[in-house]
């Protein structure tokens, strides 16, 4: 495990690379290594979270067997390839068998995955895997739409590009009518 002090030194080294060694001591940069490391503890808090723990608190579904959907959940993550942010919205759904989870748990499972060095495909798959494993629904679906900083500020520099990924499991994969109902619910106007 790298110590916090070593992380501060690593940031200072990077600042020296960016600014030139002579400028690292200027007033505006003096506390930057500590601020960066402190911010990383929040940005990458997903490494300290556990899906089983998050999804262990469930409730009796009381016979409900329709789609449970939390849509338009905003998220920000960090691309593992360029350390650039990507942000967007997620739609997370499942059809319960006997247990439901609190809606905040769906947002928290997204945060668990998004607050790590990531790619969008892994977040999408990871959330679907967690839902299947922990609550064993008839189906689970995850759709993410995001704009990527690595596409916007470097390389092809496409500002309006949106990447969409999906994971459809169980009835959402097997039954087109279930998938179609889900898509109609996602496209409903917001409140």
Image (cartoon, grey):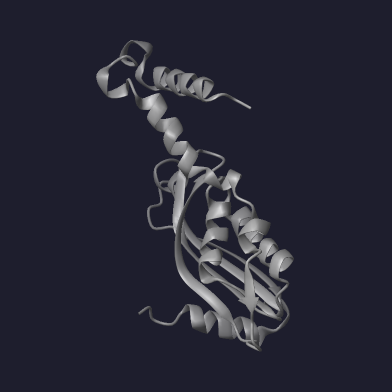
Residue positioned 45% across, 22% down in the render: 14
Q: Is residue 167 above or below residue 23?
A: below
Report x, y in % for residue 167: 64, 67
Residue positioned 70% across, 75% down in the render: 137
Q: Is residue 131 above or below residue 184?
A: above
Report x, y in % for residue 56: 66, 64
Tell which of 183 and 76 is nearer to you.
76
Identify the residue at the far left of this view: 27
Tell which of 29 and 49 is nearer to you.
49
Residue positioned 73% across, 72% down in the render: 136
Q: Is residue 32 above or below residue 83?
A: above
Identify the residue at the far top of this view: 22
Report x, y in % for residue 188: 43, 82
Residue positioned 47% across, 37% down in the render: 40
Tell which of 20 and 99 is nearer to you.
99
Residue 101 located left or right of residue 133: left
Report x, y in % for residue 178: 64, 84
Q: Give the total number of marks visible in the rendering.
A: 0
């Amino acid at each position: 495990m790298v110590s916090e002090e070593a992380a501060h030194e690593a940031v200072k080294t990077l600042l020296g690379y960016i600014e030139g060694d002579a400028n690292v001591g200027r007033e505006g940069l003096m506390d930057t290594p500590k601020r960066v490391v402190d911010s990383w503890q929040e940005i990458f808090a997903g490494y300290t979270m556990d899906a089983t723990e998050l999804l262990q608190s469930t409730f009796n579904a009381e016979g409900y067997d329709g789609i449970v959907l939390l849509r338009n959940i905003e998220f920000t993550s960090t691309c593992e390839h360029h350390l650039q942010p990507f942000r967007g919205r997620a739609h997370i759904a499942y059809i319960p068998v006997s247990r439901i989870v609190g809606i905040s748990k769906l947002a928290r499972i997204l945060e668990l995955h998004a607050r790590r060095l990531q790619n969008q495909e892994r977040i999408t798959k990871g959330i679907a895997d967690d839902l299947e494993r922990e609550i064993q629904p008839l189906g689970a679906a995850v759709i993410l739409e995001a704009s990527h900083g690595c596409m916007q500020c470097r390389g092809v520099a496409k500002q309006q590009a949106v990447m969409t990924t999906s994971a459809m499991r169980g009835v959402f994969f097997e039954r087109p009518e279930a998938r179609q109902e889900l898509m109609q619910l996602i496209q409903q106007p917001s409140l």
